[in-house]
Every structure is written in structure tokens, then in C-alpha cells.
Amino acid sequence: MGMLCSVIKFENLHELKRLCHWGPIIALSVIAICSAMAIIDAVLWYWPLDTTGGSINFIMLINWTVMILYNYFNAMFVGPGYVPRGWTPENSQDCMYLQYCKVCQSYKAPRSHHCRKCNRCVMKMDHHCPWINNCCGFQNHASFTLFLLLAPLGCIHAAFIFVMTMYTQLYNRISFGWSSVRIDMSVARRDPHPIIPFGLSAFAASLFALGLALGTTIAVGMLFAIQMKVILRNKTSIESWIEEKAKDRIQYYQTRETFVFPYDLGSKLDNFKQVFTWSGIPEGDGLEWPVLEGAHQYSLTIEQLKQKADKRVRSVRYRAIEDYSGACCPFTKGLRTFFTTPCTEEPRIALSKGDLILATRGLKHWMYGDKITDLTTDVKKPHAARLGLKPLRDSSSQFEIVLDHQGIIS
Ligand SMILES: [Zn+2]
Ligand SMILES: [Zn+2]
């Protein structure tokens, strides 16, 4: 059991289908290109294997690749851990503090959220990550974060190799002339560095790999910083957002409440140890969590219920004035709508003229809300769905509704 052997467990084989998605395909391609190019550049053109430095460099490059892939596949195949179907809290009275998930037919355990992509309630859900085509949550938070740390480190090493290879090769070419045959004969004998002269295609490939490596370092490095920030506070990205909304809500109603995030154990080391352990298996069972002294076991879920009720009160009804097919890129709705389409792959809500929409949150061009299907109940449970809308010039109550479904919390 546990993370270390889960990758190779037979029952996980069906999980291989997770690879068939643009996220893992792109991520694995980048890893393959950067690793292969770094190894080829080092061995052939920059740091030959028959030198001590070259061998150590080679082993380190292989090591990065293995560690990166190990954590990547662990994050992908071990997954976040799901709330068991039909789960109820031990004490049935505690149900009043929890939301019920109709899809999973279970109560949402504290810190869990229903993921629409995974179609399950995910324990301590952080976010659904398209790059691993899985959710990041309780069980894979550590391997996911380790991947985010190792990938930029490996990329920095690879980038160093690319730069040094291109520099050495260019320097030799400029010093010894552009005739590759002559360089081959003269340089290879005098100097152990460049064994084989660099061709133009090798130069172009190294330059391309350098671009990928630097891009990955910056993008993934930023994600790592964000993850560490929340982990050291024993939070998830979703919980930071809930905390923000709690402040908003309290400010809006000017009540004297204060919301204290209950899971922050106070010490960064203690928080860190909740996620990272030597065994690779995180602390706890993913359903019950240690809380601060004085905090209620369900402080956070109670706040979530308040926010949900508040969302219902503050939501606004709209009526669709045009049909919309639910297409991701609405070509037929004019250029302005097309260009303000959010870059998300979430499914959109198809609408027919006259449909009622309950919008719970509005942005400049987009809205979160849900289609009201049951006309007898005015306030149906609003999912976090995203609707795109374009206000019409002389109408304050009617909007041309265009898009979607949000995918994470409801
Ligand atoms: Zn669920
Ligand atoms: Zn998910």
C-alpha cells in the first residue's frame, strides 16, 4: 500500500488512460525533449563521459529525469484520494454542518470538494490539474509539489548544459574557422571538449530545448512557490479562496464575526509535516483533520454553508434572449463574444431562448451561475457554473448569455 508501490499496482492499470489527454502528452513531451537534449548535448558536444565531471554530470541528468518522472507518475496515478461513496460523519448530528453531494451520494467531508472532471468528491482538494489529468489533493499533494520543485531544478541544470554547449561550440567555430572537417581533426585532439562539431540542426535543437527549459523553470517554479505558500499554512488553493470569500462576506454584512482558518497548526514545520512524510503517505485519513485549539471541528464547513446561503441571497436571475449551443468558441455570437471567451476547457451550458439563469457571481464579461430547470423552486441549488454574458445596450435586466460550467467547487 501507499504511494511508493501504487504506480505499479495491477489495479491501477486502467489509470493508464489518464495519459491520453493533452496535459500529460505535452508535459511528458517537454520532459522527454529537455532530458534527451541535455544528455545528447552533454555526452556528444560538451562534457564527454570519459571525464569524471562528465560522468557525474551524466548521472545527475539521468537522476533528475527519473525523480521527475517518478513524482509525476505518482501524482497522476496515485491520485488525490476520494471520499468513500455514501460517507457520513461518525456522529450523525454533524451532518448539519456538512454539504451533501448528490452525485457521490455522500456528505462532503471537511476539506473535500466535488470535482466535476473526476466526478468524485476529492479529499483535501487543491485543484484539478490538467497537466497530470487528475486532481491534486490529500494523497498526491506531496508528490505533486515535489514534481513542481524537481522539474525547475532539472530544467536549470539542462539549461546550463544547453548554454555551455552552444557557447563552447560557437567559440570553437569562431576560433578555428567554420570548416567542420578541420575543427574535427584539430580540436578533438588538443582539447577533450567538443568531440564532434555541432551542426546547425543540433544548434537549433539545443536552442529550442533551452527555450522549453527556461519556460518550464519560470512557469513551474511559480506554481511551486504558490503550493509551498499554502502548504506552510496547511491550506489548499481552494481554502485560500474560501478564506477570501469569508472576509468579503463578513465585510458585506458588517457582522462582528471573525473567521479563523482552523487547520493552520501555527508552526510552519508542523504544517509541512502534515503533507510531507518519509513514508510518502500524508498524515491522517483525509476525512478528519486536527484543528486549532478553540476552533470547531467544522469551522470551515460551517463557513462554506454560510457562503452558500449568501450566494443564494445575492444571486440574480437572468433570461436568455438567444439560443446557444454550448460550443466552446461561440463563432456565431459575434467577434466581441468570441474574443472575450475564457480560455478554459470546461463544458459550457447550452441554452435556449427563454431559459432562466441564476447567476451567483459576475465578472466583466462572464458569470458564474446555473440554469434554472425547475421553475417551481425559485432558488435551486446553484452550482459553480460560469456563464458568459454580454449586456445589451438598452436593457438592464436582459443579457445575452453565452457560456459554461466551472468545474470545481459547488
Ligand atoms: Zn461528489
Ligand atoms: Zn479532478
Image (cartoon, rainbow, N blue to C red):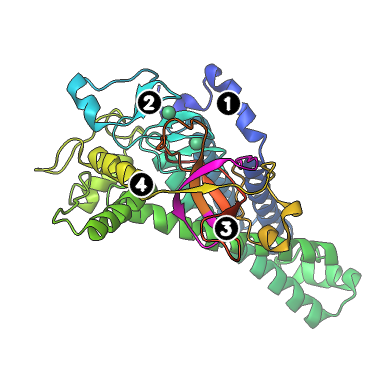
Question: Helix, strand or loop at disc 4?
Answer: helix
Return the mark for residue 15.
1
Residues at circles 1 and 3 in contact by the CB criterion of under 8 Å: no
Q: Residue at x 54, y 51 (%)?
A: 60
Instruction: Indicate left or right for 171 with 301 as reference.
Output: right
Q: Nearer the viewer, residue 134 or 270?
A: 134
The local crowd at label 2, few if under 14, some if 14 to 19, many if 20 or more residues have their Cα within 10 Å, is many
How far is mark 1 from mark 3, CA to CA? 28 Å
Nearer the observer: mark 4 or 2; the answer is 4
Report which residue position mark 3 lands on: 155
Magenta residues (range) = 347-366
Report which residue position mark 4 lands on: 311
Q: Amino acid at mark 4?
A: Lys
Residues at circles 2 and 3 in contact by the CB criterion of under 8 Å: no
Residue 349 colored in magenta in the image: yes
How far is mark 2 from mark 3, CA to CA? 36 Å
Report which residue position mark 2 lands on: 83
The local crowd at label 4, few if under 14, some if 14 to 19, many if 20 or more residues have their Cα within 10 Å, is some
Q: Amino acid at mark 3?
A: Cys
- Tell me which numbered mark, 4 or 1, is placed earlier along the sequence: 1
Q: Amino acid at mark 2?
A: Val
